[in-house]
Amino acid sequence: MNVVVLKVNGAIPGTLTYEITRDGKNLPGVVHQIPFTIKNLFEDEGHIRDLLPPSLVRDIRQWVLDQPAKGILAVDAVNPEMDSIPWEYLPELFQWPSVTVVRLLEQKEHVAKKKRNDKSRMLAAGWSGKPWYDLPAIQDELNALSQVALGEDINIRVLFEPSPAELIQACKAIQPVFLHLVPPGIEFQGENLELIISGDKDLEKIQVPEFLSRLSALDFSPDLVVLNSCHGSRGESGISVLRLITRELNTAVLGWYDQVYDKAAYDFSLFFYNRLLLEGESVLDAFRSYKTLQSERKNPESMTRGIGFERMARPSLLGLPVLWATDLEQLSQPIIDPVKGRKEAAGTGYHFETAPLYEFNQNFLNESQSIPKIELDFEPQAWLNPALLKNGRPVIVNLAVTPDRELPNAGLSVTCDTGNGSSKVRLTMNLKRGRQPIPIEVFNFPILYQLIQENVSRRRINFTASCQYAGFLLAETTRSVLWMEATEWLDKPDTWHYIPAFVNPFCEGVMDVIDKADAVLKNLATPTSSFSGYQTGNTEDVARQVEALFNCLRTEFKIKYIAPPPVRVFVPGEAIPSGQRVRPPDEVIKRLRGTCHDLAILLASCMEHIGIFSIVVLIQGHTYVGFWNNKQDHTTFWEEARRNIRRLTKGPGKNWTITDKEELRQLFIQGKITFLEGTSITNPVGTFPKAVQLASQYLGIERQFDVAVDVQASRYEIQPL
């Protein structure tokens, strides 16, 4: 396996010592001073980024580049007080898409797992939490799990509202390979951890240490425990419940870092167990598959519904899955053999059995004397752009069926065939007579993300929707869709808010700029100056940092202006071009050429890397960039803007775009934003003050203003390509 083990000792604030093992070899350790507290991690993303020293970040990045195989970053945090540190967020921050974080808990004595018989056993238990909690998806989840492998050689036992004694007895009798627990909440204080359960009257709790002690006395050691509840890895400066389960049962444990929306936990269960039980993937691969899917369809607004978004200091930490293990080798092996005849082509999507199954009458068709008829309405998107797909734009626009009678246990499927492989989503539903829409939010196709990873250029791909019943194919239709290249940018009002997908603060080109700009900043300011973002609280320091980036690009790289690529971007059904090909920051730095749009994206990427909040501004025929002079002004503006009811009608991106020219002008007049003409870096005699002056004039020019897109404000929903 491609593994780097980070053994972390110490505490924060204080000194952390990283012991590094790669390919079985111990590398020189790293000592790192941490001045901030765990609480600070949830107040500022920059603190999470500072958990690792720069030298270690560079070493891991080089390891990622050198190893084509997917990597595991195994974090062995010796001190349980560090369980609340969001290590799983590091790959997202540092743009290590092929790296999966696993929390490693070394056992003093390795206990070999017992050999299992042919039947794989699963025990799922959940509690509604009524009347203190309102989590209807818990019962839905248990109902769905009871059917997820119906008819296969997998024994699934489901308990709803069991008492602690009933749960212990069930574990003793069944000895499950998989233990799935869905409590409505967790309470913790030091090692006094409790799973909250209840009936309809009095609140009850399960004492976790006592519960685990009783299981250990039964010689009970499942291969996997899933705790599908909030706060599994948040120890509040103490041990987390996930660590405690891993330690006491010597098993792999999967849970959630912080809060997770009720429906998101439900979706996770269906996806994960279909991968694990029906497709025969290992725990690690099923976990990776979910992480990949999750990163492509983040929607924190829905994930925080009912929680109170304003309370979440770090929305990007919401719904962060966490995997603990004592044995990485065992984690990477399939727990069971794939069920014969059920494994699809590479990249299979969901296999849902979401409806209660009726007992089927084999003579139904003979009695009805006719094969059912059904109309199938199916409309995928006419074109798929990677930047939009990766950031939540749905693949399917409409899917509805109209049967001429009730059809219990009808099968619906949608297959995506890209030429490189296929993904299929299947559902079993009880259809009523007449038209009924099918929920399209469950339709995700992993094979599309493979196209993104392989940087596949423009091509046609096919989507096929079909409906089956009692062995008959009742309806089927195929639609052709245009797959667009990752660098194709669409200059359209309904896609402007996706611009931050092209802003990449951790690509190699940006790294090269930052490395050289450091010396430029020290010459411009003082020998002790550094790229510290807004940490000094001085607006002049912020301007100097941006000026250092500007001067470095102008004098050290000597970038030249170039016209947009000659082949414009068209989409189906439109006679005029909708956009242009974007040269990403890596290409601009390598070729030293860029358009106004390319250079604005490059500058925004560099500013984001050093922690300065940028704005990309589009006006008719031109793109330039701006930056916030003060972090607090940025926070205050967007807090007020998101509460402004007038913004509710402005469609997608309303929480990070400005479409009112006067609103943007006022931010400039009040000294909250500085604008910068990016093409000035191509002028050998250009200066930073002159570039600021040129860009400031655009707000007064009678040229159509399109939009200003705030990169930092978008990051809870729009991620870089």
Image: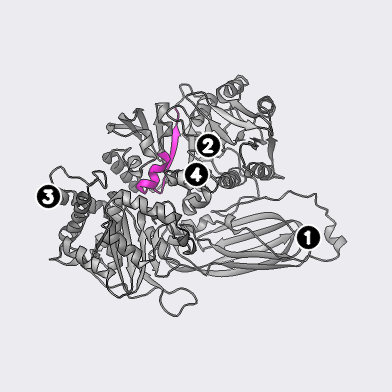
The x and y percentages for residue 666 are: 31, 62
Query: Toward the viewer: 133 or 416?
Result: 133
Marks counted in the figure total: 4
Q: Amino acid at mark 3?
A: Asn
- Binning the other alpha carbons within 10 Å of mark 2 as few (below 14), some (14 to 19) or many (20 upward) gives many
Residue 523: numbered disc: 3
Q: Mark 3: which secondary structure? A: helix
Q: Amino acid at mark 4?
A: Gly
Q: Earlier in the sequence, mark 1 or mark 4?
A: 4
- Binning the other alpha carbons within 10 Å of mark 4 as few (below 14), some (14 to 19) or many (20 upward) gives many
Which span is picked out in magenta? 87-105
Mark 1 vs mark 4: in front: 4
Query: Toward the viewer: 525 or 599?
Result: 525
Mark 2 vs mark 4: in front: 4
| Residue hosting label 2 | 254
Residue drawn at the location 16% of the way across and 50% of the way down:
521
Q: Earlier in the sequence, mark 1 or mark 2?
A: 2
Q: Mark 2: which secondary structure? A: strand
Q: Spatial distance from mark 1 to mark 3, Cα to Cα?
A: 77 Å
Q: Spatial distance from mark 2 to mark 4, Cα to Cα?
A: 12 Å
| Residue hosting label 1 | 406
649 to the left or right of 706: right
Q: Is residue 594 visible?
A: yes
343 to the left or right of 8: right
Residue 181: numbered disc: none
User: Does the magenta portion include 95?
Assistant: yes
Q: Earlier in the sequence, mark 2 or mark 4?
A: 2
Mark 1 vs mark 2: in front: 1
Q: Spatial distance from mark 1 to mark 4, Cα to Cα?
A: 38 Å
Residue drawn at the location 83% of the way across and 54% of the way down:
362
User: Does the magenta portion include 686?
Assistant: no
| Residue hosting label 4 | 319
